């Protein structure tokens, strides 16, 4: 029995978003446009220097789960938060949009993680992440019944940094395949790929059915100079790859089947969550039996909606926006 369309597993974070100029980003010493891990003290320092901020429950995989639910799908999430103000907000936000999240709030260990998102005038975002409790995810959080009853288990590449979390997602992948379910992976970030290239290549070949990556991530994974070279390499590496190219849209490849998907027209405000909501639309379509090209159009729609405003969660009901795409 399929209880959930998509189960996502990742680092549970609260996003703290603020606009700033390039000079501010330079002063932080953080790589512009990338995600950089920081400790609690450094996170506090940068937070203190930020201007007015908006605090929104986030985390890549949780954003995807929220997107699936907004499209009308059945979504579940596995992650670790603490019994603190941010942890309670995170849990409430997921429940409020209909995502299944039953992990108990941790009373020991680190505080709930947070991601400082600095949005520059060109809508690029620079992320400073303190994983906190999210980094303490381990196998005890993997609910075998939830994994086995989910059509797709979606793994966040960021989880590959903490060793215990890595083992947790390996176990989840094994349970999913043991139940004849599919496993999806997002590469998450170019620097994440650089840190874990060999393990990612092995994981994709052995355990991943559906791969999500942007152009920088996929070329870095295969250490090639062009997108076309990377496309050729990934074609024989996993069953389905959905590769995004920003304003140039995306390409979906499944063996000899290739679909070029246009980007959905939008005025870009903040690119935070674009990849997360792209994955949400694609996985919603896939688990509801739509052809790959339609899955790609739903993915493009999800990404466009989330970059039209500040924050990484949908501001509108995606199921309503998707009606024209689905012929409704």
Image (cartoon, rainbow, N blue to C red):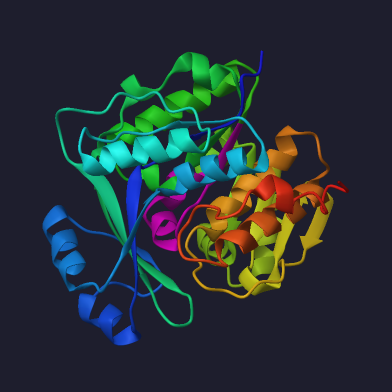
x, y percentage for residue 107?
16, 27
Residue at image position (72%, 66%) is 264
Residue at image position (38%, 36%) is 92
x, y percentage for residue 134?
29, 40
Q: Is residue 108 left or right of residue 91?
A: left
Q: Is residue 54 above or below residue 239?
A: below
Residue that lies at the very extreme toward the left in this rendered image: 41
Q: Main secondary structure of the magenta part?
A: helix
Res. 149 visible in picture: yes
Which image quadrant for residue 304? Answer: bottom right
x, y percentage for residue 175?
52, 19
Q: Is residue 233 above or below residue 82?
A: below
Q: Is residue 200 left or right of residue 92?
A: right
Q: Is residue 182 above or below residue 310?
A: above
x, y percentage for residue 259?
81, 57
**55, 39: nearer the viewer:** 55
Residue that lies at the very extreme toward the bottom in this rendered image: 23
Residue at image position (51%, 33%) is 99
Res. 239 visible in picture: no
Q: Quadrant of the N terminus?
A: top right
Residue at image position (59%, 65%) is 215
Q: Which residues are magenta?
A: 183-201
Which image quadrant for residue 51? Answer: bottom left
Which image quadrant for residue 117? Answer: bottom left
Q: How many marks?
A: 0
Q: Is residue 99 above or below residue 201?
A: above
Q: Is residue 150 magenta?
A: no
Q: Is residue 184 magenta?
A: yes
**182, 318: nearer the viewer:** 318
């Amino acid at each position: 029995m399929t209880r959930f369309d998509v189960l996502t597993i990742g680092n549970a974070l609260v996003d703290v978003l603020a606009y700033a100029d390039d000079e501010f980003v330079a002063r932080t010493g953080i790589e512009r446009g990338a995600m950089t891990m920081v400790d609690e003290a450094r996170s506090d320092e940068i937070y203190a220097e930020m201007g007015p901020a908006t605090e929104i429950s986030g985390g890549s995989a949780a954003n995807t789960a929220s997107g699936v639910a907004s499209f009308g799908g059945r979504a579940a999430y596995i992650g670790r938060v603490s019994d603190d103000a941010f942890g309670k907000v995170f849990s409430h936000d997921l429940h409020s949009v209909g995502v299944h999240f039953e992990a108990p709030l941790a009373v020991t260990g680190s505080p709930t993680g947070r991601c400082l998102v600095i949005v520059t005038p060109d809508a690029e975002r620079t992320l400073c992440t303190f994983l906190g409790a999210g980094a303490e995810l381990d196998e005890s959080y993997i609910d075998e019944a939830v994994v086995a009853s989910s059509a797709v288990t979606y793994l966040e590449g960021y989880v590959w940094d903490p060793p215990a979390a890595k083992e947790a997602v390996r176990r989840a992948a094994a349970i999913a395949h043991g139940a004849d379910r599919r496993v999806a992976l997002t590469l998450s970030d170019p620097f994440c790929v650089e840190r874990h290239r060999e393990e990612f290549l092995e994981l994709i070949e052995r355990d991943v059915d559906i791969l999500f990556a942007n152009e920088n991530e996929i070329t870095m994974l295969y250490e090639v100079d062009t997108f076309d070279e990377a496309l050729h390499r990934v074609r024989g590496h996993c069953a389905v790859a959905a590769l995004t190219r920003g304003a140039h849209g995306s390409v979906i490849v499944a063996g000899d089947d290739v679909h070029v998907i246009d980007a959905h027209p939008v005025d870009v405000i903040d690119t935070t969550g674009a990849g997360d909501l792209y994955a949400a639309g694609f996985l919603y379509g896939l688990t509801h039996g739509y052809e790959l090209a339609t899955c790609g159009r739903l993915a493009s729609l999800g990404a466009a909606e989330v970059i039209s405003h500040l924050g990484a969660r949908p501001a509108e009901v995606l199921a309503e926006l998707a009606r024209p795409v689905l012929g409704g």
